[in-house]
Amino acid sequence: MTLLRSARPGVGSNDRGIPEATVARLPLYLRALGTLAEGGVTTCSSGELAEVTGVNPAKLRKDLSYLGSYGTRGVGYDVEYLRYQIARELGQTQTWDVVIVGAGNLGSALSTYQGFGSRGISIAAVLDTDPQRIGSNVGGVEVESFDRLAEIVRERHVSIAVVATPAEAAQGVADALVAAGVTSILNFAPTVLQVPDHVEQRLVDLSIELQILAYHEQRRTHDEADGGQEVMA
Amino acid sequence: MTLLRSARPGVGSNDRGIPEATVARLPLYLRALGTLAEGGVTTCSSGELAEVTGVNPAKLRKDLSYLGSYGTRGVGYDVEYLRYQIARELGQTQTWDVVIVGAGNLGSALSTYQGFGSRGISIAAVLDTDPQRIGSNVGGVEVESFDRLAEIVRERHVSIAVVATPAEAAQGVADALVAAGVTSILNFAPTVLQVPDHVEQRLVDLSIELQILAYHEQRRTHDEADGGQEVMA
DNA sequence: TCGATTTTGTCCACGCGTTCACAAGCTCTT
DNA sequence: AAGAGCTTGTGAACGCGTGGACAAAATCGA
C-alpha cells in the first residue's frame, strides 16, 4: 500500500471512475492473467484468479464488474479478452514516458527492471545532478543531466516522474518536476513532498513498510505473552 | 500503499490494537517529529504536524488518540514525548533484525539505506545464491550464501525478511523463509507469494505503482476531452 | 480573577470497501 | 429436451475510515 494518495478530495468516487481500491488491484489481476496466458491457459474462473492473486473471489468479481460484464456464467473469463479489457482500462493502450530522477542504487534498480515495457511504461530518461554519474549507463539508458529535465518533459510529453534521490534533494526535485509540468510523482525518498493539489503523489517508503511489519510482530509476541486474550480481571 | 496486507481476517480491528490505517501513518508522524526535533522545535500542534505529513488535522488527532491523551489543550504536543510514545507503540524499543534476500540493485539500495538504524531496524544479513556476489560488500555488509539462511534466522532471532530477488526466484525464497521461521515478509518481487496464514506479507510493486498513476493520468486527459462532465446527451 | 484565545479529544454522520448469499445464466450429460 | 452442476454478477448488510463540528481544557493578558 502506498501511503499517500491524491491530496484532493473526491478521488476514489469519480463520476464514471473505478473505486481506488479496485484500481490498485487491477494490475495484480493483469499480471496474473499474463502468467496464465503464457502457460497456455485460455479460460479461468474468479476462484482460480483469486487464488493466485490472494484476493477474495467475491471481491475480485466485483472489481471486474466495474469494467463491464466480461465473464460467462458457468464458464469463467476468457484470459486474453479480460487481459485486454483490464489493460485498456488502465490506459495501457498508450505508452507512458516516465522520467527517473536519481541514478543511485534505487534509480538503477528501476531502470534495470524489465517489466515496464510490457505494461505500457517506457523510461524516457534517467537524470542525476552528480557529474560522476552523468554519461554512465544504467539499464541500457544513459544518465543525463538533471538540467535537461524541462526540455525532456516538453519534448517527450512526460507527465509521470519517479523521485529516487536522497531525502534532502527530494523537495527541490519535486518543485522542478512540477514547474516542468509533471502531474504524477512516484516518490521513493523518505519525505512527504509538498506539491500543488493538481499533482498526484504516491509515497513508497521502504522503512515505513518494515516498521509496519515490526509493529505486527511486536503485537504478536505481546499477545502470546498475554495468552492471546484479555483475561486479567 | 502496499497492495497486500495480512491474509488472515480480523487484522485491522484487533482487540486492543490500533486501526491498520493509523498504524500505516504513525511512522510518518514519527519521522516528521524527528525532523522537528532536529530543528530545535519542542512543541507542535496537530495543525503543524498535519501540514508536513499531508494528513487531515482531525484524522491526525484521532490517530494519536489511539495511543492515549498525550497532548495539552491550547498548547499542542511535546515533540520529544510524543516521539517516544509513537516509537514505543511501533515496537521500536527493541531492535528488529532483518534479513535481505537478493543482493542486486534493489537489495543493495536497501542495504545502503541509512535510515534503518534510527528506526529500530538492523540488517542481520544480506543473502544471495550467486557465487559472484557472495563475499562482496553492499552497504557495509558482506553478502553471504543463501544456504546460511536457517542458521542466521535461528541465531539472530530473525522474524522479518525482505525479498529482493527476481520474480522467478521469489516463491522458492519465500518457502525457505517460512521454513526457517520467518513470519513477516516484505516482498519487492513482482509476484504474490503463497504463504501460510500465520505469515504476513506486504507486497511493494514498483510497476503497479506506476500503473496506478498512469490510470489517473489517463482519466485526467480523458475527462478534459469530455469537458469534465458528461453532457453528451 | 475573568474573559479571550488556542488547541485537544471525541461524538456523530457519511461514504467507501468488503463479504455473504443467491438469482440469473451458461454448459454438458442423459 | 430437461435437469444437474458450475460460475458469474449483484443486492444488501456490515464495518472501517474519514472529516466536520464542538465541548473541554489550558494559556495568556488585562
Image (cartoon, coloured by chain):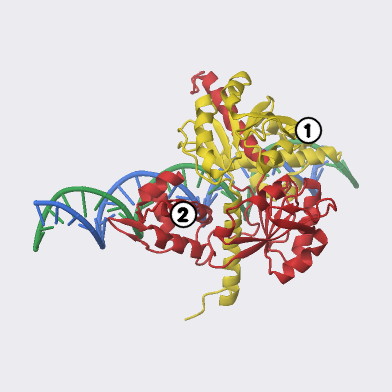
Chain colours: A red, B yellow, C blue, D green
The picture places residue A202, in percent across and down from the top left corner, at 65, 53
Are the residues flagged by discs 2 and 1 in contact, CB closer than 8 Å?
no
How far is disc 2 from disc 1 in space, using C-alphas? 50 Å
Q: Nearer the viewer, mark 2 or mark 1?
A: 2
How many numbered marks are there? Answer: 2
Kindly tell me whether residue A36 is visible in this rendering: yes
Question: Chain letter of disc 2?
Answer: A
Q: Residues within 10 Å of mark 2 (few under 14, many from 20)?
A: some
Q: Is residue B198 above or below residue B53?
A: above
Q: Residues within 10 Å of mark 1 (few under 14, many from 20)?
A: some
The picture places residue A223, in percent across and down from the top left corner, at 53, 24
Q: Is residue B83 above or below residue B192?
A: above
Q: Amino acid at mark 2?
A: Gly
Residue A191 versus residue A226: which sits nearer the camera? A191
The picture places residue A122, in percent across and down from the top left corner, at 63, 61
Quarter occupied by residue B163: top right
Q: Is residue B120 above or below residue B57?
A: above
The picture places residue A177, in percent across and down from the top left corner, at 75, 61
Q: Secondary structure at mark 1?
A: helix
Question: Is residue B205 toward the left or the right of residue B135 in the image?
Answer: left
Q: Amino acid at mark 1?
A: Glu
Q: Which residue, given by chain and number where applicable, does mark 1 sit on? A: B80
Q: Secondary structure at mark 2?
A: helix
Question: Chain letter of disc 1?
Answer: B
Q: Which residue, given by chain and number where applicable, does mark 2 sit on? A: A34
